[in-house]
Amino acid sequence: MKDKNITNGQLLIELAEIHRQIVELEKSEIKHQQIEEALRESEEKFQVLVELAKDGILLETVEGCILECNTAGAKIYGYTREEMNGLTIAHLVPEDFKKKLPKVITDKETTHGIFLPRISKKKDGTIFPTEIATKLINLRGKSRLVVYVRDITERKKEEKKLKETRKMFASLFENSPEAALYHDENGRIININSRFTKLFGYTLEEIKDRNIDEGMIHPKDKIEEGKRLTKKALKGFAEYETIRKKKDDTLVPVIISASPVIIDGKYQGAICSYKDITKRKQNEKLNSVLYNISKAANSRISLDQLYPLIHKELGTIIDTSNFYIALADEKEDKVYFPYHVDEKDDNFPILHFKDTNSLTTYLVKIGQPLLVSYKQIKQMIDKGELNPLGTLTNKSVWLGVPLKIEDRIVGAMVVQSYINPHLYTEKDIKLMEFVSEQIATAIQRKQLEEEMEKLAYFDTLTGAYNRGYGLAILDRQLKLARRKKYKILLAYIDIDDFKKINDTFGHEEGDQVLTEVVKLLKSTLREIDIICRMGGDEFLLIFPDSSLKDLSIIRERISKSLAELNRTSEKSYTINLSLGVSEYNPDNPQSMDELIKIADNRMYEEKKSKLKRK
């Protein structure tokens, strides 16, 4: 009994054993003196054990009057041991609890070692929580009540603190700006917040107790990835970017952040947050589209090569199954379609503002984005606002945005569907508008480049190569012919009586003649043949891989085309040409200047011959 570190459990066991011994002694036939001695010894042990107890121990009458109290019990209530003796249980409870106290405690009211909560009152009136256990015993022939009292104030504080912490956690979890999920160490889902429901479409009732890695929000190709993340999250913080699946099977790009939940040093599970990065991904795609279009516009590709690239890039951010670009020329009063890809129509004729009122011309006129369904199109037709061209179905949807350079409308960009009336939304209008300025700028840049190229390489009046570029081409052709060992035929052409036409009918008429001659030559000669305006009414024709034996065929074609031109012309004059030729032979090569001089001289010889015949 000298061990001061005896536990409450051991104390209760000792008390029970002493009580058993007392009962046994009372039942035995031992002499009265021996019984008294045994009882005294047992009571001494009892008193020592009671005093060692950390819980309060009260000995009461069945009416609730306190007979004895240990030091711990007096301390709990703020009294001395002497003050406690003679008090009733009514002194130790709040006023509103007194009515609930029984007048006499019977065995039915005792708890037999089970601690029950009670609100108690200290000497100074302080109300505090306790746990009470009671036991009815027979002591020296009288019923006595042993009351065990435990002050649980600190425990309640801890419980309150824990409860507040849990409430705070629950509040943070629920009000997290991102979708959040809590699962145990086996991946079993315990809770989700409302953001999770909003993002993925699942309610807690639908997914609680399911395993996070069973593929519920994982695309098939991401299930193993998800399992690896779950294991990693249980060991420490993990974060990475991936794809997850919504309830409706649509995919969503997310950044997942996962942290372990550790309680009492043990891993209990993990909290995972899912940040929807759809907008960021769209912006990245959009920036990529704009960058690629800008890069292409600044590259050496042609305008015809730029259009399909625009189509391809735009197709990464919006459905472009049916797509076309229209350009408007106000001076010539026309809208034409340099690029179009369509499932239903292939005929995209040049339109005139005055004669047509199609969706495209309507859009260019109003200069505003237009998203219309079949029903809306029909209403506009009924009002006389539209006279659309091309195919129209009862599921058609048409989305077009103007192409603008500053405040000037230069055309339109259009996507449409014949089978899905809900394919495009207001968001797609903003998307198309956002890229349209960049696309319009890219197209204009290429148009300017082509105009500059024409100025650098082409004769602005006739469209033939100019002298400088034509001679550069001839130089390259001669070098190639020398290496490849093939012949080249040159022809020098002059328009007969061109000065007379100019003097008689004016220079504008002369310019028309020059244009008609080049047009005739382009339609008559091969695609590989080269037409170069040397100056005035003189032209140099270059025929790669040709020789003097081909001259008769060339002359015959030109003569026939010229005769047809004069026959259909309503002019009072006829157009005639004089032609001189030279041949480059790699076995006996001559310089470019020599070849041109030979062809020029032969042309003048033919012209003189014509004059003599007159």
Image (spheres, rainbow, N blue to C red):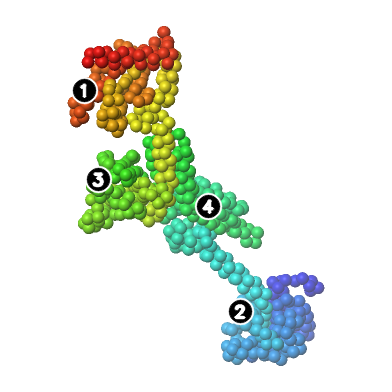
- The amino acid type found where label 4 is placed reads Ile
Task: Please name the residue shown 24% across and 20% down the image.
Answer: 559
Residue at x-position 22% and y-position 15%: 614
- The answer to whether residue 215 is above or below residue 180 is above
Circle 3 or circle 2, nearest the eye: 3
Please tell me which residue lies in front, 35 or 253.
253
How far apart are the two marked residues, 3 and 2, measured between alpha carbons? 85 Å
* Front: mark 4 or 1: 1
Tell me the CA gap for discs 3 and 1: 41 Å
Residue holding disc 2: 117
Marks 4/3: CA–CA distance: 45 Å
The residue under the point 52% across, 61% down is 177
Circle 3 residue: 390
Where disc 2 sits, the SS reads strand
Mark 3 vs mark 1, foreground winner is 1
Q: Is residue 121 visible in this depiction of the protein?
A: yes
- For numbered disc 3, what is the local secondary structure? loop
Tell me the quadrant of the picture where the N terminus can be found: bottom right
312 w.r.t. 253: above or below: above
User: Relative to 422, does residue 332 appear above or below in the rendering?
Assistant: above
Q: Contact (CB < 8 A) between labels 1 and 2?
A: no
Dot 2 surroundings within 10 Å: few (below 14), some, or many (20 or more)?
Answer: few
Q: From the top left corner, tell me how far across and down residue 174 is, in percent.
A: 52, 65
- Earlier in the chain: of badge 2 and badge 4, it is 2
Q: Which mark is residue 563?
A: 1
Element at label 1: helix
Q: Residues within 10 Å of mark 4 (few under 14, many from 20)?
A: some
Badge 1 crowding class, 10 Å Cα cut-off, few under 14, some 14 to 19, many 20 or more, is: some
The disc at residue 255 is: 4
Amino acid type assigned to the residue bearing label 1 in the image: Ala
What separation in Å lies between label 1 and label 2 (alpha carbons)? 121 Å
- What amino acid does circle 3 point to? Gly
